[in-house]
Structure formats: C-alpha cells, structure tokens
Image (cartoon, rainbow, N blue to C red):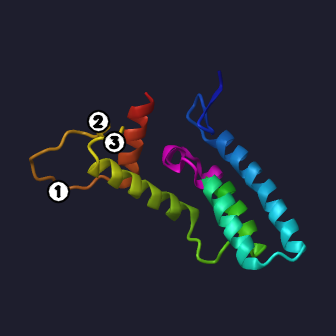
Amino acid sequence: MSSLKILSVTITSGLSMSEHVRNVVTSCAQTLYTLRLLQAHGMCESALQNIYRTAIIAKLQYASCAWWGFTSADDKQRIMAFLRRGQCSGLCPTDVTSFEELCESVDRQLLNQVLTNRNHVLYGLLPPTSDALQRYTMPLVFMLRKITSDFWC
C-alpha cells in the first residue's frame, strides 16, 4: 500500500502530503471555477467571498493540524499559488491572512485545548509535567509534530 486515506487526508507511506495537497487543490480549483462562473453571471462580490471562505479556505484548512507540518516547500508553494489565483480574481477576501498563519493559529488553538482539557484524546500523549524550572520553550510546531507522530505510530 503506497497511500492511505484517513478522514479525507491522504498520507503516503513516506509521510508525504503531496498527494493530499494535489487532491485538495484540484477539488478547490473546481470550486473556484464554479465561483468564477457565478461571478461572470453577476453574483455580488461579498456573497462570492463568503462562499470562497466557507468552501475553499475551509476545505484547504480541514485537518491541517495533522498534515501541515509534513508538507514540503513545493506543497506549500502549490497552496499559495492557488490562493493567489483566488486573490487575483477578487474572490479571496482581502482580510484573509496567509495560509501558514491560518494553520499556525489552528495549531495553537488545538494545543491550548489539549493543554486545558484533561479529557482530550491527545492529553495522554503530552510529556509529564515537571516541577523543575525550565528555561526554554519548545516551538509550537515541534510540540504538535511530536504529539501527532506519537499518535500515529
């Protein structure tokens, strides 16, 4: 088996997310085409931007906590190029921050939920708390990668 699709996230045997990114961007491109048709037929800009945010941004961001940390630079470029197409056509709202910032925000929210909820399914995968004063901070991305890699192994 070379790839596995779990909850619509395609993971290859080498933990590459290229196939997942390709599938999601292809699906979003079809939605973008439909939005362009609606734009050509006179649908108002604010409604199109709401649909873009709801359909495309949400689809791209789905389960990003599980896959964003494993994407290659090429995959990130592919996503950013697709989002630029939406911005050039006027469909992507101007208040949308970069996709990387959106993913980091979702990662922070997940980590905060895990840290504050002892009943969270990922709480047991956190390292034990230490009474010693620690003078370092682990970057959020590395901590989430550790949690998710422990979870999948």
Q: Quadrant of the N terminus?
A: top right
Which residue is located at x 78 percent, y 73 percent? 89
Q: Farthest residue toward the top?
A: 1
Left/right placement of residue 5 relative to residue 138 reads right
Left/right placement of residue 112 relative to residue 27 reads left
Which amino acid lies under the numbered mark 1 shown in the image of this protein?
Arg
Q: Is residue 12 above or below residue 84?
A: above
Please report the bounds of the magenta region as a residue range: 61-75
Q: CA distance from mark 3 to mark 1?
A: 27 Å
| Contact between labelled residues 1 and 3, with CB atoms less than 8 Å apart | no
| Contact between labelled residues 1 and 2, with CB atoms less than 8 Å apart | no
Q: Is residue 71 magenta-colored?
A: yes
Q: Find disc 2 in the rendering and name its residue.
A: 124
Which amino acid lies under the numbered mark 2 shown in the image of this protein?
Gly
Q: Looking at the picture, how far across and down is residue 73, in whole percent? A: 60, 52
Q: Looking at the picture, how far across and down is residue 100, in whole percent? A: 53, 61
Q: Is residue 147 visible?
A: yes
The secondary element bearing badge 3 is classed as loop
Dot placed on the residue nearer the N-terminal end, 2 or 1: 2
Near-viewer residue (48 or 22): 48
Dot placed on the residue nearer the N-terminal end, 3 or 1: 3
Q: Quadrant of the C terminus?
A: top left
Picture quadrant where residue 76 is located: bottom right
Q: Residues within 10 Å of mark 1 (few under 14, many from 20)?
A: few
Q: CA distance from mark 2 to mark 3?
A: 8 Å
Q: Find disc 3 in the rendering and name its residue.
A: 120
